[in-house]
Amino acid sequence: MKNKRLLFIIGTITISLSSCVSLDEEPKSSLVAENFYTKESDAISAVNAVYETLHFDAGQSLYNGLIQIGVEMATDDYEAGPRARNSHVRAISNLTHDASNNRMEELWKESYDAINRANIAIDKISAIPAENISADIQKRLVNEAKFLRALHYFNLVRWFKYIPLVLHETPTLTTENLNVRQATEDEVYEQIINDLKDAEQLPAPNEYSSSDAGRATAGSAKALLAKVYLTRQQWQLAADKAKEVIDTGWYDLFNDFADAFNPATKNGKEHIFSVQYQGYSNYVGNYLACRSATNEVPGISGENADAYHQESDLYNSFESTDKRRDVSFVTDVVSPTDGKTYHLRVPLLNKYHDENAISSPKESSVNFPYFRYSEILLIYAEALNELSGPTDEAYKAVDKVRSRAGSSKLQDIAPSLSQDNFRDSVFQERRKEFIYEHQRWFDLARRGSEYYVKMLKAAGKTQAQPKHIHFPIPQREIDLNPNIKQNPNWE
Amino acid sequence: MNEVKKEVKTLRYLLIAVLLFWGCITTFAQTLKGKVVDSRTQEPIIGAHVSIKGDNKTTAGTTTDIDGRFKINVSSFPTALVVSYTGYNNEEIDVYEVTNDEIEVTLNENFNAIETVVVIGYGKQKKADLTGAVSAVNVDNLSKISASSFNSALGGSTAGIQVTPTTGQPGGGVSIRVRGGSSVQGGNEPLYVIDGFPIYSNNTSAGATTGSAINPLASINPSDIVSLTVLKDASATAIYGSRGANGVVIVTTKKGSFNQKTKVTYEGSVGWQSLRKKYDVISARDFAILRNEVLAETYPNLGEYQYKTQSEIDALGNGTDWQDEAFRNAIQTNHQLSITGGSDKISYALSGGYYNQDGIVINTGYKRLSGRANIFAKISKTIDVGVNVSLARSKANVAPNGVVSSIILMPATATIYEPDGSYTLRNPFEMELSNPIASLKEQTNQNTKNSILATAFTEWEIIKNLKLKVQFGANSESTKESNYVPSYIYEGSSSDGIAKLGFVDRYSWLNENTLTYNFGIKNHFFDALLGFTQQLDHIETAKTGSSNFVTDELKYSSLESGSIALTPSSSESENTLISYLGRVNYNFKEKYFASVSLRADGSSRFGKDNKWGVFPSVGGSWAVSKEDFFAPLSRTISSLKLRASYGITGNQEIGNYQSLATLASSSYYFGQKVTCFNPARISNSQLGWESTAQFDLGLDTELFKGRLSVSADYYYKKTRDLLLSVEIPWTSGFSSSLQNFGSVSNQGFEFSFTSHNFIRKFKWDTSFNISLNRNKVLSLGNGATSYISGNYIVEVGKPLGTFYGSVTDGILQADEIETKGTYTGLAQPVAGDQLYKDINNDKTYTTSGDRTDIGNAQPDFIFGLNNSFEYKGFDLNVQITGQFGNKLFNQNAQYLALYTGQQNAAAEAVNRYTASNPSTTLPRAKLDPAPIFSDRFVEDGSFVRVKNVTLGYNFHKRFVRAIGISALRLYVSATNLLTITKYTGFDPEVTSGDNTVSQGTDYGIYPIARSYNFGLLINF
């Protein structure tokens, strides 16, 4: 009895003084950065994460709705639809937005998130020892990240003009690290061009296996470089780079315009770079299809939030033979439940409509075409016209796009345009070709504030002002970082 | 030191001697008989303790039986019997010789609350000896309120705690603030200590079901609770260190007593609940007119009757009343059987309960089956052991997300069923709302939970008054979430049925070792505590599911039948806490009291450079009334005590792994899905505690021989090193980083009064408490002075929960378009548009630029008033609670005020601006569906509420004995009987969750019910 009791007492004391738990944290269901980026598979998933920033997971992210509502609403062709419930979006559509507008904040935030992921990928992958990664893959992955970094910086510099140029991960939370300075436009463009020049060393489209279809290619880099030069009005460089893309022979137009937006022909010969979507797959579908779809036809759960601006002259500007109008817009919809045809009050945007996702348009598998071959042709035409007027080659390039669409040739209907008129024609062609492809605002803005205001006022958006060719830098960033100043026009 | 040892030794010998002596003399014992009655009612007192004075061993004592009678053995005369019973003054009877007569002992009720013992952290203390602010909740009153969990019934019970339901879903949660919320982004809920086991009440879901989370504390049967103490100031809470900053609620469940006859109690009740008030919405006819108006304005070329023709409108009646269809009178039942008793070595309390509450929203409810066993045993003279085990299984049918707002926003012209009898899928208009009746009736959205909370301890009295207590505890919860959305309702229509299953496995174990010693040297009394504890929490979740079913028959029970598998997910996380604690309570002549405590906590949740925190406190009190100079006053003021305390407590409720640069995973698509890993946050090895320094000054007094007692407290709490997601420039790739930055203060007064107004045959007691708390942000990280969080602003100098929005300024009239048009925020203003104030004076209004502080969700004061009456067998209890000065954002009303014709509108929409009715308060109908957050929807949330009225009748002993039982009570009770408020929503007692920054938004929240119950209680 006595022994038992002694045992009991000793046991109790022993237990009470021994510590069985540890204070070290070892997360079991998430990885920690310091143990990652050590081998090829890590590197691949890190670069995949940069691609993911093109749409993130949810709706209303960059190429899955945000650019439409945060940027394109501020043009003559689009407006906030009847179901756009966000007052910030309606403000952009009305051109009453300001530096506290949360869609502008999102544009800034998501783009820098993407850039940070690219920066991490570039630095960390370059540091992986050779024995853990094949040299080709290492180089390719770094260049893919550079292409995507250039893509996002190119957006940012056009939207916000004076932006910080961040090229490495923020290591610690010190003010010096966090309070970055704004760079000049030239500095940003120089970096974009350098990154794209590196990315030109990416594999050609045909060098990728089908399980890598959708990655950035040498063609993507060259095409984007052509566009950067065009935006910088470096016409010769733009024309040369566009010609270079044409001459690779990697790309051509689909015979049918509709195939550019057909899930069956995705990542095809016309697609230079696309944001990838796949519905009904536990992955994301193209949410733009849902944002533009009707909500008034039984059996279709559309959102009717991204709308065509009713006062725009675009819809009525198509020739009757031009197939682009009816691919881009829809006016009559058959209900999947009652089989009846419903005539819509106004034409709705319809480019990302997927026949296999009629009742649930958010499951559309249509890719978002960031860069199509037709744009290379139009860049080439525009650059040539700026260099030496509407040459024959310039006409041919435009007409290639027009003929494919079923429209008559410019050469036939307006063979001797002035340089200015030819420029307007190219812009109008871009407008018709790239409806709902996030090109309009950039096109208006790069023509300058006068043009922008003129076009918007013509479409009844009377609040348009010269400052609207840029967006205000989010007030939050100015508040948090004393080194950031608002754009002069927005002060 | 030597002297103490010697004394201990002596005591030990003495003890042995006494034991031996007692053993020898029992053979010569004589028996005395007696009866104990209440001096006022002359009713026998059952369970009173009778012992022989000077004999400390409980075995020598006895308790009275159901007739109040006792027998006790006495070894020698003269002797004195000591009779005691909770709530009565002790009585001493001198007995000089053996007698066969029955000794009648009358006990007087004791109003001297200060003599009662309260449970504190790691121990008990006489209320008179407290140096800290500690409130014992009246559990009797608490149990009268019909509620599925004890913490949801706490409102108004004591000063300093604000209790707001986050949902009316049966089994749903509440938000509790002890002396105001101090953390901006960390948790603000108090720590619960249930029979010695600390629990932070947060919910983990696998995400398979939607709707309100189930309150983890709902698995504790409220009827099992015997005492509930709220620790408020640092002197009381610092012993809980890193978890004490939000206050501590100590819950003790019913125990048996040694030497007590077996007592069997049954309590049962049945009742019904109903909705307090509906939203007043427009009729089908008026809705059709409204929609026609909007369409005609948007598409003028399509005419005036685009939705319904005049004759169709005339044929419309009131249409569907969605609220009537969705709300019901719901039944609730409660049964509880408990058995308590004890021999000289073992005491026990066993109970079983069944609780079934249907919700006032159709097809929702909560059921709980629970059992408990609390057993204590003296296994030797110096060793006690005990176990507390409680088991519960609960099942909740939860209202799916968004259902309540759909009920409000579905227009009356929409129907529940199509003409062919199938469900209407959704709102036929632009606002996407699924048919809420179909969602409620056809969706399965169920949470099933098994939980076990068990603690076991052994206590060894090493030498007299030196006790070592070792306790182990475990809390294990496993939850299954089942969800099925059938193909024939909107949510499942595009996927042919969606089934999801979720599992949460959570366990926590605790080891707690304490050494206590109390001793006195002359007039100095010490009570010391030393302890070491360790606790681990582990959570795993898993979710899986599939869709596209051939049939809706199998629901979630055959996932393999769905042709598309949903992405599965799982997670695992763990956190640990290691602590050392110590406390010394000291008093001199029971006049001067001091208490010093210290706890060191190591938590895994913090950065590797900052794992340990130290939390000290000091408190002192002075029983002024015991001073000689006070004697002249003592006739009126029977006791007066002043208290002061200061200490530091912590908060670690930030979730796990927040200091590490963890990676998040997502996916992209290159011909097939590929995995992405990206950094989710920047690491912060410095991440540490949020610490709250609190100063408290208090006064406790009793007047008129205890007939009136008053407590008053002033406190000032400053929380610094806030665990704040400090906003960092987005250029870093991140939005925020969890850092220790900034500070928040809370200061306030608390008063409570208890008065025994009548104490004779007619008894009337009143208690009243009122608390005022002022909350203020003192600083924020990185030199920032404010940041906006949705509809709220966190700003230095302002309290948390400050609404930030636009200010309405009337309606644009036809002749004002030129002059005031820019104050509508619209590109093309039209007469009838809402006008807003130009806050930033730029001659134009923008939704983001022209916002300001438009009210605060924190009340100016809250109060509770309780009156109880007793006359003969009747008792009546009336509890009133209220709060004043808080604002609520009625977001339901905001949506009903969008006259878009896309969804329902408030009844007042018929008075909207039209050309013929140029309203100055209500805007015109138009397509614009963007809600603007403005002062128009920030309403006064003040209310006074009759929280509970209970009328009971206790049958006379003679009557109940005749039918073979020992007590019978019948009662009828009403909860939330009457509410006086200006708030226009379902119910003013509501908040949007437990985030302090964004409190006070009422949107789509399941409304709390009014309920009536009938019950009976039988003692066998």
Image: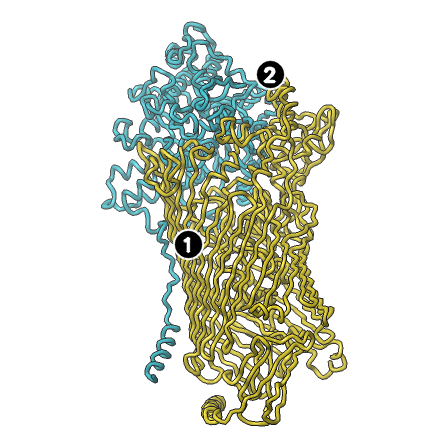
Residue B38 to residue B96: above or below: above
- Asked whether residue B797 is in view, the answer is no
Farthest residue toward the front? B962
Residue at left offset 33%, top offset 81%: A4
Figure colour of chain A = cyan
- The crowd level at tag 2 (other Cα within 10 Å; few <14, some 14-19, many 20+) is few
Which quarter of the figure has residue B745?
bottom right
Tag in front: 2 or 1: 2
- Which residue position is annotated with label 2? B302
- What whole-number distance in Å separates the C-alpha atoms at marks 2 and 1? 60 Å
Instruction: Judge from the rendering whether residue B193 lies leftward or rightward of residue B296; answer left or right.
Output: left
Q: Are marks 2 and 1 on the same chain?
A: yes
Label 2 amino acid? Answer: Leu
Residue A56 to residue B873: above or below: above
Label 1 amino acid? Answer: Tyr
- Which residue position is annotated with label 1? B657
Residue B671 picture location, percent across and down: 31, 31
Residue B396 picture location, percent across and down: 48, 49
Circle 1 SS class: loop
Reading the chain from its start, which is encountered first: label 2 or label 1?
2
- Asked whether residue B887 is in view, the answer is yes
**Could you tell me which chain the residue with mark 1 belongs to?**
B
